[in-house]
Amino acid sequence: MSMSFDNENGNLVCIFPHRLDTEACTRLEPEIFGELENFNNSVVFDLSQVEYVSSAFLRICLRVFKRFGADKFSIVKVSPLVKKVFKIAGFDQGMKIT
Amino acid sequence: MDKTPETIVDQIMEKATLAAAVFSTLDQAHTDRIVRAVYEAGFNARVKLAKMAHEETSIGRWEDKVIKNVVATQLVYEDIKALRTVGVISEDRERGIAEIAQPMGPILAVIPVTNPTSTIMFKVLSALKTRNPIIICPSRKAVRCCAETARICYEAALNEDAPEDCVQWLTQVSREETQALMGHRKLALILATGGGGLVRAAYSSGTPAMGVGAGNVPVFIEKSGDIPFAVNQIFVSKTFDNGTICASEQAVVVEKTIAEGVEGEFRRRGAYFLSKEEIALLEEVAYDREKKVMNPDIVGRPVDVIARKAGFPIPANVRLLMATLKGVGPEYPLSSEILAPILAFYVANDFQEAVKICIDLNYHGGIGHTVSIFSNDDEKIKRFALLMNAGRIVVNTPSSQGAVGGIYNTLSPSLTLGCGTSGKNITTENITARNLLNIQRILWRRPNLRLAQFDMSKYLDESQDAKTIESEFNRNY
């Protein structure tokens, strides 16, 4: 399963596959940061298909958050289970997660 | 010369220590006679003490405080009366383990202004049942009713030859004295029920403490739930004692398909849905933005008083103020815990979104406490429960009474509700006398036969891996 990218009004929407385990993240990480290189508009992680996230994915979120900040990075369409993972990780304190 | 806080506290602790020493010699029958006498005295004073608490604090309704006093005496007594709390309380010769119940020692009971008399009676019964002397530290706003409650309990205990000073109480409460008591080397335990600051102070004192966390209870009316029943139960719960129970509902979450029906049912029963302007006015009087907590001036006050303070009129038959909100967090003050007849109201597109709103509310100041669901779909109830961080997930039940226990379920009745480590508590249980014992274990020799038959030299051989050792260790002879 691979991820896809969409451009919505100049903003980058990253649509992830259903299972973001360590192996998938190792494969996807260069792809994501390749897309983000020299990119300065807003970034949206669309997790509508995601059922599982690993700590590797949480680290990717942190890297993107550090680079773009709360104003330009958001995570959307999370399932309740994934939302709980973000809550426990404490990500809801800074990141926009809906 | 005036006594310093340290001198006063030393004297209190001296008396408590002597009481603990004498208490440790009492047998089960004598202990049970004392507990029964205290229960009867407290129960018989339930109306008088409820009225005193209401008059002194202006919080809640005296009729509801009577019910709280009944829970704290009759239901608590029924729950603990058969409990063995003295000497050998269990013995399993086959396993070679016997348990001995020992008292902990002097207990400091921190009492909240919202439930003063009931919390004292609950804590005194629990402490005396476990042969622990208790020192009552009341809220500064409820000193008189607390002193009277403690006096009634103490005199009843003395009439059954309880140790002198087994119940003591402060009649003047200073921060210095409270802190000195909390950190006193002879104090065994703090039972801290009250505001966040006090509970944190208890945990920081160096003395073992059992505290409570704050609540911010979401109630999810799932679409399979019985709407009139659910709304009726939420009304019963949220208006009880004007919303002063920390397990009372703080926000109603409904799915869009039933939102209109739920709203109509609330209106029919006397709920007033606030306009945007009224919500803004209410936020200013209900919430202290600087301290990020509810404003104590509106705690347990009736709706007409709250509306008057906020500066808007409400019809005479209104019993509950409801605020439709779009989000959760500091920018939505009414999404926080507010112990008054005020409820937030959220409409979600579907089950998934409703659960996500409940997670947000749960983590917004109410982590580990209580959540509530009205549903007739067991699968969804379980899905909801697994995603919440709450010691109590009450189902088709008014959450105030459901979380306290003993009324709508078989949970032990308690006025101190543990919130687990997420709520900075040691347990998610309802605290009872069972938590106030030091359990000693006699351990007779019962050798581990598998270990005895195992060739221990194999542990020294690095070539033996875990699988090989495990297979050998568990071999059937």
Image (cartoon, coloured by chain):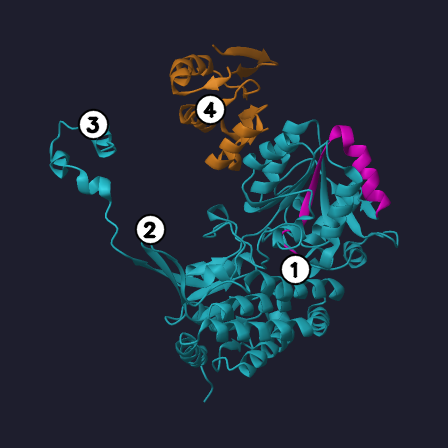
Chain colours: A orange, B cyan
B102 over A56 or under it: above or below: below
What is the chain letter for disc 3? B
Q: Quadrant of residue B146?
A: bottom right
Q: Which residue is mark 1?
A: B296
What is the chain letter for disc 4? A
Camera-nearest label, 2 or 4? 2
Q: Which residues are magenta?
A: B245-269
Camera-nearest label, 4 or 1? 4
B316 over A61 or under it: above or below: below
Badge 3 local density, few (<14 within 10 Å), some, or many (20+)? few
B419 over B433 or under it: above or below: above
Task: Give B289 or B5, whichever is nearer the viewer.
Answer: B5
What residue type is disc 3 on?
Thr
Q: Which residue is mark 2?
A: B95
What is the chain letter for disc 2? B
Q: Which residue is mark 4?
A: A53
What residue type is disc 4 on?
Val
Disc 3 and disc 4: Cα gap in Å?
Answer: 35 Å
Q: Secondary structure at mark 4?
A: strand
**Where is residue B389 drawn, in percent x and y?**
54, 41
Q: Is residue A14 left or right of residue A56?
A: right
Say whether disc 3 or disc 1 marks the residue closer to the N-terminus. 1
Q: Secondary structure at mark 3?
A: helix
Task: Give A32 or B256, whichever is nearer the viewer.
Answer: B256
Locate the C terminus of chain B and report the quarter of the image it occupies: top left
**Where is residue B265 drawn, in percent x and y?**
82, 41
